[in-house]
Image (cartoon, rainbow, N blue to C red):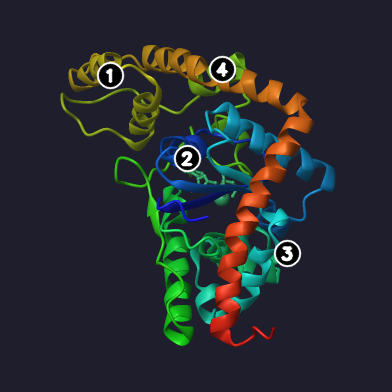
Amino acid sequence: MATGKEIVVSGIRSTGFLHLGNYFGAIRNYIRMQEDYDCYFFVADWHSLTTHPDPKDLRGNVFRVLAENIASGLDPEKVALYAQSDVPEIAELYLLLNMLAYKGELEKVPTFKDKVRLQPQNVNAGLLTYPVLMSADILVHRAVKVPVGKDQEQHLEMARNFAQRFNNRYGQLFPEPVAFNFGDNLIRIPSLDGTGKMSKSENEMATLYLADTDEQIRKKIMKAKTDSGPLEPGAPMPETIANLFLLMQQVSAPAVISDFERAYQDQAIRYGDLKKQLAEDMVRFIAPIREKAQELQQDKPYLNRIMKAGAEKARASAAQTLQAARKLIGIDYY
Ligand code: ATP
Ligand code: MG
C-alpha cells in the first residue's frame, strides 16, 4: 500500500536476550521512526539458523525479541512487526540475488572471516550468503533507510551493490538503502570489559541485557574495567572510561554527566561514584522494559496476533516487489 512515506526496514536475530547495543543501535531508532515512516521490523529467525539453535530455544527467543521490542515502545499498530520466515517472498528474492553475488566478494566480508575463525567446524553456505539474505530482507520492501548499529555498515554497502547490479542488468527496481541513525553517526555500544561490542551471543558478563535484574545490572556495572584515574588535568580519556561515559550519555541526566565530566577534567573523579550513578540510572531505564516484556511474554495469543498481522502486511508489500522482479528477469509466464 503506497502511503507516500519513506520505507524503512530492519531486523534483529533471534539468537538470545536483547541488550543495550540492540536498543541504542536499533530499537530506539525504530521507535523514533514509527510515526513518520512506513516501517517493516522483523525477527530474523532464518538468520539465526546459521548456528543451528535448539528449536525450543529458538521459539522462546523469537517471542522474547517481539516482546522486548514492544516493551521498549514499538507500537505494532503503527509498524509491521513480523517473523522473517513468515514472508517466503524474502527467500525467493534471496535466490534471485544469489545469482548476482560472487563467491569472492562474499568470502572477503569481515564478519564472515570472523565466523570462519570462531566456528571452523560449521562454515555453511548460509553463513557465506548471509549478506545476500540481509539484502533480500531490505530490498523486498524497496526500503530507503535501514536503522542499524555500526556493525552492520558494511552489509548495507553490499545491499546497495546488489541493488545496483540488479537495476543495471534488468532495469530500475530497487532504491539504494542507507544505514540510518537519528543523530547522524551509527552507534556502537561497547562491552563493559572493552573487548568488543555488546552482543547477544557472546560475553554475557560484559553485556547489559534488557532482561537483567536490578542486581545483575548493578553487579555488571560495578565490575566494569577502569584504571587508577587521570594522571594530569585534561588527560585524554582511556577507552574503558569513555565507554562508561557513552553509556551515561544514553541514560543519565545532562547535569549529572557534566558534573562527572568536570570531575574527570579536574582529576577529582571517583570511578566508584561514577559507576554507582550509572548503575542506578541504568536500573531506572531497564526495569520498566524488563517488567513489561515479561508480562507480554505471558500473552502468546497476543504476540501471535501481532506476528500474523505483521506478516500479512509485509507479504503484501513483498509480493509487489517480487512480481516486478520476475517480470524484469523474464520469469513471469501467466
Ligand atoms: P548476534 O551476536 O547474534 O549477532 P547481535 O547482538 O549482534 O547478536 P543482531 O541481531 O545481529 O544483534 O543485530 C540487531 C541490531 O542491533 C542490528 O541493527 C545491529 O547493528 C544492532 N547492534 C547489535 N549490537 C550492537 C552494539 N553493540 N551497538 C550498537 N548496535 C548494535
Ligand atoms: Mg550480530
Check disc 2 and give the amino acid type: Tyr
Disc 1 to disc 3, how far (Cα)?
47 Å
Q: What amino acid type is highlighted by mark number 4?
A: Pro
Query: Which-is-in-front pick, marks 4 and 2?
Result: 2
Is the residue indicated by label 1 positioned so its CB lies within 8 Å of ligand 1?
Answer: no
From what the image shows, is residue 275 above or below residue 182? Answer: above
Residue, disc 3: 122
Residue 250 x/y as whole percent: 38, 27
| Front position among marks 1 and 4 | 4
State the mark number for residue 47. none
Query: What residue did someone put label 1 on?
Result: 254
Q: Name which quarter of the figure residue 56 lies in.
A: top right
For the residue labelled by badge 2, is the local secondary structure a helix, a strand or a loop? helix
Q: Nearer the viewer, residue 70 or 7?
A: 7
Q: Residues within 10 Å of mark 2 (few under 14, many from 20)?
A: many
Inspect this view and state whether residue 244 appears: yes
**Element at badge 1?**
helix
Q: Which residue is mark 2?
A: 30
Amino acid on which the number 1 mark rests in the picture = Pro
- Measured in 3D between alpha carbons, the distance from the residue under mark 4 to the one under mark 2, in whole angstroms, is 18 Å
**Residue 219 seen by the camera:** no
* Mark 3: secondary structure: helix
- Circle 1 packing at 10 Å, graded few (<14), some (14-19), many (20+), is few
In this view, the residue in front, 135 or 57, is 135
Point 66% across, 56% down: residue = 47
Is ligand 1 within 8 Å of the beta carbon of the residue shown at mark 2? no
- Mark 1 or mark 2, which is nearer to you? 2
Q: Picture coordinates of residue 82 (x, y %)?
A: 65, 47
Vertical side of 284 occupied by 302: above or below: below
Q: Is residue 178 left or right of residue 184?
A: right
Q: Quadrant of the C terminus?
A: bottom right
